[in-house]
Image (cartoon, rainbow, N blue to C red):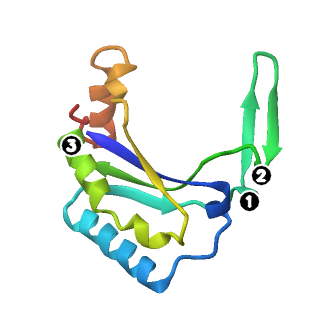
Amino acid sequence: MKVMMMVKTTPQGDAAQPPSEEALVAMHNFNEELRKAGVLLDLGGLTPMSRGARVHYSKRQCKVLDGPFAESKELVAGYSLIEVKTFAEAIEWARRAPFGLLLRDGEEVEVDLRPLFDPAEFDVPGEAEERAKRLGAKPSAA
């Protein structure tokens, strides 16, 4: 099962100063644990929303808005994509993350965990498996 761990922050935290050296070392060590356990597929931190854009779709138009967005209450600051046997295992990895070290007094962070859909859920039966074979990947086990 592939699970996305999304680290959320507030607009104030999004524009905050870089983390301390202690926090960076702790996060590096945690990410290294994920890698050594063989569950880490990808990870990344996102630049502040002031450098981003939002694309808004309606029935008849598509509108691009440049960041930052004052009306946002929370923003995704980073992510880790992990592959685990169970959702409970993903929760345990999230509980071990040292995100608290990234925060200053009064700040909070949340981590959302969301399993990815298996491509087979959207394909004609058997097509996902065939595509995985052609790409040399194993189908994900749900």
Residue at (30% x, 35% y) in the render: 132
Which of disc 2 and disc 1 is earlier in sequence?
1
**Which residue is labeled 3 in the image?**
88
Q: Secondary structure at mark 2?
A: loop
Residue at (73% x, 37% y) in the render: 55
Residue at (29% x, 56% y) in the render: 95
Q: Are marks 1 and 2 in contact (CB under 8 Å)?
A: yes
Q: Residues within 10 Å of mark 1 (few under 14, many from 20)?
A: few
Q: Is residue 88 above or below residue 24?
A: above
**Which residue is labeled 1 in the image?**
51
Which numbered dot is residue 68? none
Q: Residues within 10 Å of mark 3 (few under 14, many from 20)?
A: few
Instruction: Give the Cα distance between marks 1 and 2.
Output: 6 Å
The residue closer to the viewer here, 2 or 128, is: 2
Q: Judge left or right: residue 5 versus residue 56.
A: left
Which numbered dot is residue 67? 2
Q: Quadrant of the C terminus?
A: top left
- Residue 107 point in image, percent of width and height: 54, 63
* Quadrant of residue 133 within the rendered picture: top left
Instruction: Give the Cα distance between marks 3 and 1.
Output: 35 Å
- Residue 87 point in image, percent of width and height: 24, 40
Q: Secondary structure at mark 3?
A: helix
Which of disc 2 and disc 3 is earlier in sequence?
2
